[in-house]
Image (cartoon, grey):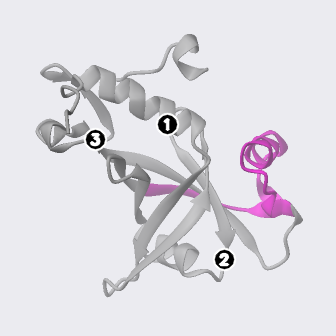
Amino acid sequence: MTRPPARPRDERIRDTLHRLEHDVDAWFATADPAGSPYLMPLSFLWDGHTVLISTAGTNPTARFLEATGTSRIAFGHTRDVILVDAELRETIPAAEIPDEVGDAFAARTGFDPRDQSGGYLYFRLAPRKVQAWREANELSGRTLMTGGTWLTGEEPHSIRPTRSERS
C-alpha cells in the first residue's frame, strides 16, 4: 500500500478546523472521579473556539463533566483521527440557552434539547490539546495544540480558518 507523504502541521490544523466546522457527531469520553470511563456519541456545534454539546443532566456524560470538568473527544476513523482533550467552560440549562445559540445547535445537529423533557443541559468545552494523524508517518508531530494554543512552526499562536476554509 502506497501512503501519501505526511501532511505539514499547518495543513493538519486546517484539516482539523475543517472537520470541526463540518462534522456533526463525535465520540465523547468522560470518567467519574474514580476514573471509571464512559463513552457516548453526541452531536456538537463548533463556534470557532469551543465545542457545544447537550445531553440529559442525568446522563453519565453530564454527571462526569460536572464532577471532573474534562472530556476526550474523538473525531473520524482510525486512519484519519483527531483527538481533543477538552475542559468544561460552562454548563447551561436548556431553558437558559440564548435563542441564537440554541437555534444554531438545533440547525446544525438536527436535535433541539430545548424540546426535550428530562432536564437537558448544554456543555461548552474548550480544547486544551489537539492531536491529528492519518498514518504512522504522521505520528511524529501529531500534536497540533497544547495549553489551548494552536502550534505552527516552532512558536505557538492562534489560528483561525479563513472564510473560504470554513465552507
| Label 3 neighbour load within 10 Å: few <14, some 14-19, many 20+ | many
Which-is-in-front pick, marks 3 and 1? 3
Q: Name above or below for residue 111 compared with residue 11.
A: below
Point 46% across, 73% down: residue: 39
Q: Secondary structure at mark 2?
A: loop
Say whether disc 3 or disc 1 marks the residue closer to the N-terminus.
Answer: 1
Classify residue 76 as left or right of residue 134: right
Say whether disc 2 or disc 3 marks the residue closer to the N-terminus.
Answer: 2
In terms of image quadrants, where is residue 158?
top left
Point 40% across, 82% down: residue: 32
| Label 1 neighbour load within 10 Å: few <14, some 14-19, many 20+ | some
Real-space Cα distance between discs 3 and 1?
14 Å
Q: Is residue 148 visible?
A: yes
Q: Marks 1 and 2: in contact by CB < 8 Å?
A: no
Which amino acid is tagged 3?
Arg
Real-space Cα distance between discs 2 and 3?
35 Å
Classify residue 152 as left or right of residue 72: left
Q: Name above or below for residue 66 compared with residue 22.
A: below
Magenta residues (range): 87-114
Which-is-in-front pick, marks 2 and 1? 1
Closest to the observer: 111 or 32?
Answer: 111
Residue 16: x and y, percent?
Answer: 41, 34
Residue 124: x and y, percent?
Answer: 56, 52
Residue on which the image places disc 3 = 134
Residue on which the image places disc 1 = 19
Closest to the observer: 106 or 137?
Answer: 137
Which-is-in-front pick, marks 2 and 3? 3
Q: Secondary structure at mark 1?
A: helix
Q: Secondary structure at mark 3?
A: loop
